[in-house]
Amino acid sequence: MVLRPVPDPPFRPAETDREQALVELVDRTGRPVGVATAAQAHAPPGRRHRAFSVLLITPDRRRLLLQRRAASKTRFPLRWGNACCGHPAPGEPVTLAAARRLADELRLTGVALTELGIWCYRADDPETGSVEHEYDHVLLGELRPEQPLDPDPGEVAGLRWVDPSELADLLTNRPEACAPWLAGVVRSLVDAAGQRWRR
């Protein structure tokens, strides 16, 4: 069920500005090794950098919020992903950066976030030529499905609550419709929640 499809503007200055923001380059253990702009980090062949992915589930842990990324996104546009993603500034606590992105993308504040683990991946975007090579902190928060959301149309093309079987069907039968990190970050949820999410 799509909660609220929103139109996408043809040009997004804020997205361009975000590409010039600094991100933290890391080694395979997550130790900082330098900085680069987001654009530099995502240029081929891709440089490993710190990121975060926020998963929002209902308090009964039976549904997960998915976001369809806006057409103006510089990486994997119009694909279904988790509630929001982003990059902390160098040295910035991941939970603070994630709270800021929730406010920017979904106009959502006051969500307590817990780190579930790390998902490391590399993925090439055939449409934009960009590369994701991320040391991804997976964060979990709870949200009641009736809570109103006001997504930024420059960030979000749609929102959708799914149960485990709907998500499994999407990942199995329509993987091309999903962001390449979605299956990995959901695996962190399954590992943490076990049967409470899979039922």
Image (cartoon, rainbow, N blue to C red):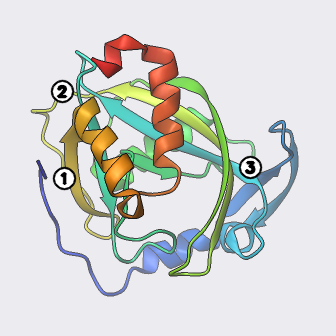
Residue sitting at 43 percent across and 14 percent down?
194
Label 2 sits on residue: 144
Measured as percent of width and height from the top left, residue 18 is found at 55, 68
Judged by depth in the image, the label closer to the viewer, 1 or 2, is 2
User: As rendered, which of 69 and 35 lies closer to the eye?
Assistant: 69
Measured as percent of width and height from the top left, residue 8 is found at 25, 76
Q: Amino acid at mark 3?
A: Pro
Q: Secondary structure at mark 2?
A: loop
- 109 to the left or right of 179: left
Label 3 sits on residue: 90
Label 1 sits on residue: 150
- Are discs 1 and 2 less than 8 Å apart at CB? no
Q: Which mark is residue 1?
A: none
- Location of the C terminus by quadrant is top left
Q: Is residue 102 above or below residue 110?
A: below
Gap between marks 3 and 1, in whole Å? Answer: 29 Å
Q: Is residue 97 above or below residue 24?
A: above
Q: Secondary structure at mark 1?
A: loop
Q: Is residue 108 visible?
A: no
Residue sitting at 66 percent across and 67 percent down?
38
Q: Amino acid at mark 2?
A: Arg
- Tell me which numbered mark, 1 or 2, is placed earlier along the sequence: 2
